Amino acid sequence: MAGITPNKRDSFGSKFGVIAAAAGSAVGLGNIWKFPYEVGNNGGGAFLVFYLIFVILIGIPVMTSEFIIGRNAQRNAIGSFKFIKPGKPWFLIGIMGIGAAFMIFAFYGSVAGWTLEYIFQAVKNGFAEKSPAELTDQFDTFVSHPLRPVIWQVIFIALTAGVVLAGVKNGIEKYTKILMPLLLVIILILIIRSVTLPGAGEGLKFLFKPDFSKITGSVILSALGQAFFSLSLGMGTIITYGSYINKKNNLGSTAIQVSIADTLIAILAGVAIFPAVFAFGINPSQGEGLVFVTIPNIFQQMPGGYFFTLIFFILLAVAALTSTISLLEVIVAYFSEEYKISRKKATLYSSLIILVLGVLCTLSNGGVLAEFKIFGRNIWGLLEFTSADILLPLGGLFIVIFVGFAMGSKRVKEELTSQGTFKGKLIPLLMFLVRFIAPIGIALVFLNIIGLLNFG
Ligand code: TRP
């Protein structure tokens, strides 16, 4: 829908559409690719326990805060702050968010492109008869190729732009309503295969039986960081989607439902992966290679492996797409509303910037720009560090402070209860989390990341 203006805005058509779109943003490579390897690296079940605690105590309050800001202002991630507190510097939170969206999309789009290559390889049976070492080789050769990953990345950005161009109702809502349930079905099929493998029980024990002797300060803090990134918080994604939510929707319960959906998908991804990892004697702390190197190896050793590898990477691509849609929508909503340009132009120009940044990222990952370093990091590392490690925690921190202390309790309460439609019995508890627990928690993660404090 071209030409969205703040006073006559597009909105999500149904309650399920809202939840599907926000959950589609949250569920992505963060859940299916990063969550399992974080669990693997951080000792299994105990990491999961802390992750769940942080989703409840910090994730839900931050998400509710973003929904409150967006729906109250009915504007984009920057316009919302300008509208609620005009003439004050709070809009800088939104500027940080737009900057982070460009940076995250740049490297996220690269990994998303890999999922397309792996669908392609799965189709032509390109993993058959390969040992883990050969698959590692295949992965390394692919990611450092000067052209191949770039081509897939361009295709992925174009796909994202196509959906965003179709607008909120015709694009995002329609696609995520189909894609999200499909995602769940594909994971459930994978789980059935995985848990019926001989020796699968060890994997389930690893995931669900907490060994608290494995807990250190750094494990706790990476659980908090993972919860934060996985729920798409701190960048204005949820503010922007919140601005499309119908005034009658209950924001608190929407945040809870989205958080449950996101957490469920992450756990189900773990249930799909770990039993198979243990059944085949793969190292669970393999790191970033867990999906791209180990999974094809696990699946090709099973009957029907060709098919399972294929659906796994389709699943990963779908999850990545609903996340990149939300990254681009934050940018497009901002440029089309604040500068009164059409959504078409806004989408085209921002996609081009993402493309340039993204290609530089991809080429810096073992390719021709690998040796080009700024502050000791390659381009990918620099963008990832600046966005995910600095801008997101900082943004989330300011967002809860804004809703907790600057926006005014009356306004917050009106938004939370939909002008008195809901009783809002849990508001005092929620506000306590928003004002105190969430900011302190996020501050601890942030301080840990920039190395001011070392709990490990
Ligand atoms: N949450 C998504 C994932 O888990 C990634 C993502 C999309 C994101 N939009 C975001 C992360 C905004 C932080 C902020 O893959």
Image (tube, rainbow, N blue to C red):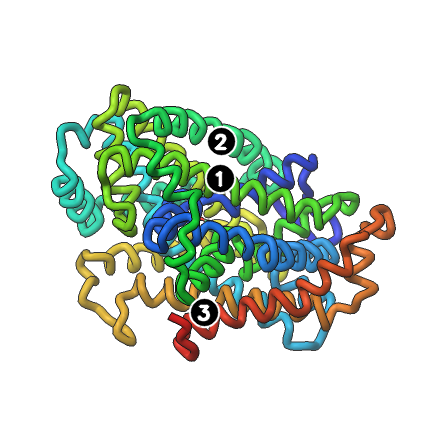
- Residue type highlighted by circle 2: Leu
Label 1 sits on residue: 265
Find the residue positioned furthest to the top.
303
On the question of residue 103 being in view, the answer is no
Q: Secondary structure at mark 3?
A: helix
Residue type, numbered disc 3:
Ile
**Rendering coords of residue 189 (x, y %):** 41, 25
Instruction: Give the CA separation, mark 3 to mark 1.
Output: 26 Å
Displayed quadrant of residue 204: top left
Q: Is residue 4 visible?
A: yes
Q: Earlier in the sequence, mark 3 or mark 1?
A: 1
| Crowd tier of the residue under label 1, counting other residues whose Cα lies within 10 Å: few below 14, some 14–19, many 20 or above | many
| Residue at figure coordinates x 80%, y 66% from the top left | 409
Nearest the eye: 253 or 440: 440
Neighbour tally class for label 3: few under 14, some 14-19, many 20 plus, Cα within 10 Å: some
Local secondary structure at mark 1? helix
Residue at 37% x, 32% y: name it: 314
Of mark 2 and mark 1, the one earlier in the sequence is: 2
Q: Is residue 219 above or below residue 186?
A: below
Residue highlighted by disc 3: 390
Q: On the rendered structure, is 345 left or right of 309?
A: right
Is label 2's Cβ within 8 Å of ligand 1?
no
| Quadrant for the C terminus in the image | bottom left
Quarter of the image where the N terminus is located: top right
Tag 2 residue: 184
Q: Between 107 and 44, which is closer to the camera in this rendering?
A: 44
